Every structure is written in structure tokens, then in C-alpha cells.
Image: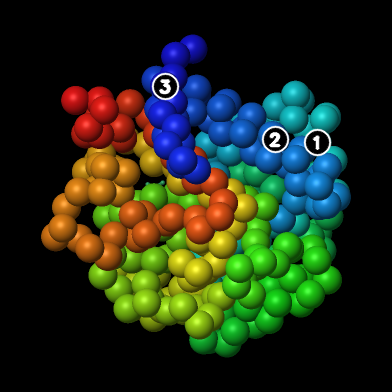
């Protein structure tokens, strides 16, 4: 197995030779963060996204994890969701449930789904309310520096255009600071109506992971990590900068191919 790691302050970039290596390292890292959260406060509040991240997380289905992790301690959230019913082919919940969650003994009431049968605005407001209640009851930690939730781990899957969650480049949604969860009705990617965590919530997390694989993402990875490309000042992946937490990028060689340290 070969991989390289570069650490700077609270940011780390892990580059792997294959998606298999990436997914095993990702599963180990998630398990490590789970253990430290359990030790610290007895619960693990994790927010996941859609995309190929879910397939990469399937390494967690190996007995090394299924038998050692206490899944009843996991509380699952979505960083973003398409405004569709839970059984719809576009649902991020359905993707995660079909490929991962349904195979793990997670307590159903700990799986906090978005109400995709409401309007986008109502679904965002309702999800924000659910999160607010869980911060109050300490299922999710509260940030000390602002009143935001402090998720133990937020997992993001970066798109080719550099979007994360449903925060798209140069979209006004990037400016929303007053809400924890907001909505859009004009997503450049199908489907148009989505709810999403705001950057305030993402950047308040204790740990954030961004996953990107494939050559087609190399340019956005370069802009986000090497901080180049003034033509895209509002690149969401570059705006992921946890204020107190730790950020780890999980890349394969192809996605990392344009990084300065690789050239
Ligand atoms: O809500 C969405 O439209 C998707 O979930 C999307 O955000 C996805 O995560 C990225 O586009 C990366 O997708 P891939 O990992 O499949 O490239």
C-alpha cells in the first residue's frame, strides 16, 4: 500500500494509489473519530453527503468494523438532500440506505432524514429545527465560538465543479450565514430543489473530510487546495476551512495530479 500525506496546521491531504486504498484509509479514519467521540461524550454525530462517497464508505461493512463498532452510538445526518421522497431514485438517503445503512444495526430513530415531501423551504426549516433540538439535548455538540452545531464528523464529496454538499460555485447560497440549513431551487445539477448545510455549519464541525477521486476533479482539487484560480473566488471546496476543527482531504492520484507538490 502506498499513500502520501501532507500536514499543514489543521489540514491534511492524503493521496492514495487506488480507490481501494482510499476507502480502507477512510474507513479507518472514520472509526478513529468514532472512537474518540465515544470516549469524549458517548455518541457520534456524523453528517454524510451523496455521490461516490457512499460507495467508498462501504469498507465499513467489513467485519473488522461491523463487529467492533457500537452502531447504536451513531447518529446520522445529511449535509444536503434533494427535495424528493425518501424512496425516490434521486434521494441521497436512499443511496446511503441501499448501499450502507440498511446493512448496519443503526437505531432507526438515530437516522435523521430530510422531509422531502415538503417544499424546499419547509424541508430546510424543519431540518434546521431537528438539528436545533439535538444540539439542545447534546446529541450534537455546540460550538463554543458561535452558536452553531459542532458535528463530530462532516463527510463531503466534491463535484467536478468544486461544489460540496449543495453549495455550488458562485451561488448566492454561499453567502447564507444566518441559517444552519438552507435551500436552493435552482441547482445547476439535477434535481433543482435541494436543502443544504451552510458553510457556517460545515466550518464549525470538529472534523471535516472532503473526498475527491478521478482526473476530472483534478482542476477543482488544485484550485481548492493550492488556492489558485482567481477566476473562481467563490469555489465552495476552497471555502471549507473549519475554524477550530480538522480538515482532511482524501484523494486518489488522478484527483491529486495537478497539485503543486505533485508536479
Ligand atoms: O447532490 C448531488 O448532486 C450529489 O450528491 C453531488 O453533490 C455529488 O456528491 C458530487 O457531484 C460528486 O459526485 P461523484 O462523487 O459521483 O463524482
Across and down, in percent, residue 82 comes to 49, 69
User: Which label sits in the foreground, 1 or 3?
Assistant: 3
**In the image, is residue 180 above or below residue 57?**
below
Mark with earlier residue (2, 1) = 2
The CA span between labels 3 and 2 is: 20 Å
Q: Is there CB contact under 8 Å for labels 2 and 1?
A: yes
Secondary element type, mark 2: helix
Q: Are marks 1 and 3 in contact (CB under 8 Å)?
A: no
Residue 7 placement (x, y as % from top left): 44, 32
Residue at left offset 34%, top offset 54%: 238
Corner quadrant of residue 184: bottom left
Mark pair 1, 3: CA separation: 27 Å
Residue in front for this viewpoint, 57 or 145:
145
**Inter-mark Cα distance, 2 to 1:** 8 Å
- The C terminus appears in which quarter of the rendering? top left
- Look at the picture and state if 190 lies above or below 180: above
Give the residue drawn at x 39%, y 50%: 158
Along the viewing direction, whichever of 80 and 2 lies nearer the viewer: 2
Query: On residue 4, which mark appears?
Result: 3
Left or right of 144 in this view: 194: left
Look at mark 2 in the image and give the residue it sits on. Answer: 31
The residue drawn where x is 26% and y is 70% is: 170
Q: Is mark 3 within 8 Å of ligand 1?
A: no
Whole-percent x, y for residue 114 in the image: 62, 71
Q: Are marks 3 and 2 in contact (CB under 8 Å)?
A: no
* Disc 1 target residue: 69
Is the CB of mark 2 within 8 Å of ligand 1? no
Query: Is 249 left, or right, of 129 in this rendering?
Result: left
Point out the tag, 3 or 2, that comes first from the N-terminus: 3
Amino acid at each position: 500500500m502506498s499513500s502520501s500525506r501532507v500536514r499543514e496546521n489543521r489540514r491534511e491531504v492524503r493521496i492514495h494509489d487506488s480507490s481501494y486504498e482510499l476507502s480502507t484509509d477512510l474507513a479507518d479514519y472514520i472509526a478513529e473519530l468514532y472512537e474518540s467521540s465515544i470516549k469524549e461524550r458517548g455518541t457520534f454525530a456524523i453528517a454524510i453527503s451523496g455521490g461516490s462517497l457512499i460507495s467508498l464508505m462501504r469498507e465499513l461493512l467489513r467485519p473488522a468494523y461491523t463487529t467492533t463498532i457500537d452502531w447504536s452510538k451513531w447518529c446520522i445526518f445529511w449535509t444536503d438532500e434533494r427535495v424528493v421522497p425518501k424512496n425516490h431514485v434521486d434521494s441521497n438517503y436512499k443511496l446511503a440506505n441501499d448501499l450502507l445503512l440498511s446493512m448496519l444495526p443503526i437505531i432507526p430513530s438515530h437516522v435523521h432524514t430530510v422531509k422531502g415531501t415538503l417544499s424546499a423551504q419547509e424541508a430546510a426549516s424543519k431540518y434546521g429545527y431537528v438539528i436545533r433540538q439535538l444540539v439542545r439535548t447534546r446529541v450534537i455538540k455546540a460550538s463554543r465560538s458561535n452558536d452553531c452545531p459542532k458535528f463530530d464528523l462532516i463527510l463531503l464529496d466534491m463535484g467536478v465543479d468544486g461544489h460540496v454538499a449543495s453549495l455550488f460555485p458562485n451561488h448566492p447560497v454561499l453567502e447564507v450565514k444566518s441559517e444552519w440549513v438552507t435551500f436552493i431551487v435552482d441547482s445547476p445539477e439535477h434535481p433543482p430543489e435541494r436543502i443544504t448545510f451552510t458553510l457556517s455549519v460545515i466550518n464549525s464541525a470538529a472534523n471535516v473530510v472532503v473526498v475527491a477521486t478521478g482526473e476530472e476533479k483534478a482542476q477543482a482539487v488544485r484550485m481548492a487546495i493550492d488556492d489558485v484560480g482567481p477566476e473562481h473566488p467563490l469555489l465552495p471546496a476552497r471555502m471549507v476551512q473549519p475554524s477550530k476543527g480538522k480538515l482532511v482531504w482524501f484523494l486518489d492520484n488522478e484527483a491529486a495530479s495537478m497539485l503543486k507538490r505533485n508536479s
